[in-house]
Every structure is written in structure tokens, then in C-alpha cells.
């Protein structure tokens, strides 16, 4: 089974858009984990009102876990993303085996109910 757990220094920037940055953190034959970082929107506001341009924006990060076998994905944000971030920090302190990573991702994937579509 081929897998790649990318260390923080080796995280690859695979996509940049106006308001999100995506990094692939893990990729194997069975699972893929992508971290979506919310970044401030630095583009000029599309509206002409000053109030709209100054409106605060909620910036939230999240994780997309794709179960390649089942063809489903789950997006974790909010408190779920924070819990998953804690798991990642633990994995950085105590390097898990691939089996441990895959077992944990399988538990999250059980929650997935979104069919995977090619995008």
C-alpha cells in the first residue's frame, strides 16, 4: 500500500484561490486528507458601499477527508476541525504507523455521506 504522510515542512500547496489555500497532508491508496486554510480576502470588495467593504469575515479552516474506496468525502470544520488538528499535533509528537493513521481516518470516513464528485 502506497502512502505519503507529508511533514509540515513538506506540505504541498496544490491550489490557491481568492480566499482559501489548500494543502494535501496525507495521500494513500485508500485516503486523502486536505487542509483548507482560510485566508483574509485581499481583493477589493465587489460592492461600492464602505460598510460592505468593512464587514468582518469569519475565517475558518477545515479538513477534507476522502475515502477513495467508498468514493465519499467528509469536511470537518469548527470544533470537529479543532479536534482533528489536535490529533495531527499528537501524530507530530508521536509518529503513528500507517495502520494507525488509516484506522483513525476510517473512523472519520464512517461519518461521510457526501458522494465524491470529480471537480
Image (cartoon, rainbow, N blue to C red):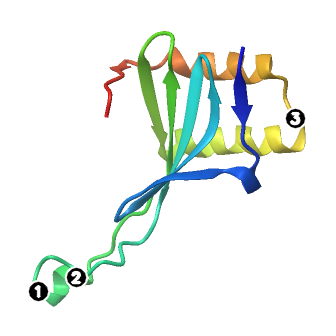
Residue 112 drawn at (x, y percent): 44, 20
Quadrant in the rendering for residue 3 = top right
* Camera-side residue of 88 and 15: 15
Q: Residue furthest bottom?
A: 50
Mark 3 and mark 1: span between their CA atoms? 51 Å
Q: Which is more N-terminal, label 1 or label 3?
A: 1
Q: Are marks 2 and 1 in contact (CB under 8 Å)?
A: yes
User: Residue 53 in the image: x percent, y percent?
Assistant: 22, 82
State the residue position of label 1.
49
User: Which residue is depicted at the point 32% across and 28% down?
Assistant: 118
Q: Name the residue that disc number 3 marks.
A: 95
In this orientation, which residue lies closer to the viewer: 109 or 83? 109
Secondary structure beneath dot 2 equals: helix
Q: SS for tag 1?
A: loop
Position of the N terminus, as image quadrant, is top right
Which residue shows up at 73% across the image and 35% down it? 5
Position of residue 33 measured from the top left corner of the image (x, y, whole percent):
57, 34
Mark 3 vs mark 1, foreground winner is 3
Left or right: 90 in relation to 88: right
Q: Residue at x 42, y 15 (%)?
A: 71
Q: Nearest the camera: 3 or 73?
A: 3
Q: Which residue is denoted by mark 2 in the rendering?
A: 53
Amino acid at each position: 500500500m502506497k502512502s505519503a504522510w507529508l511533514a509540515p515542512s513538506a506540505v504541498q500547496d496544490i491550489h490557491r484561490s481568492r480566499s482559501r489555500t489548500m494543502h494535501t497532508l496525507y495521500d494513500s491508496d485508500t485516503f486523502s486528507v486536505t487542509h483548507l486554510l482560510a485566508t483574509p480576502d485581499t481583493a477589493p470588495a465587489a460592492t461600492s458601499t464602505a460598510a460592505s467593504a468593512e464587514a468582518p469575515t469569519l475565517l475558518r479552516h477545515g479538513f477534507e477527508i476522502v475515502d477513495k474506496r467508498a468514493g465519499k468525502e467528509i469536511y470537518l470544520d469548527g470544533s470537529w476541525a479543532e479536534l482533528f488538528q489536535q490529533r495531527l499535533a499528537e501524530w507530530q509528537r508521536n509518529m503513528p504507523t500507517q495502520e494507525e493513521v488509516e484506522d483513525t481516518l476510517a473512523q472519520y470516513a464512517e461519518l461521510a455521506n457526501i458522494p465524491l464528485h470529480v471537480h
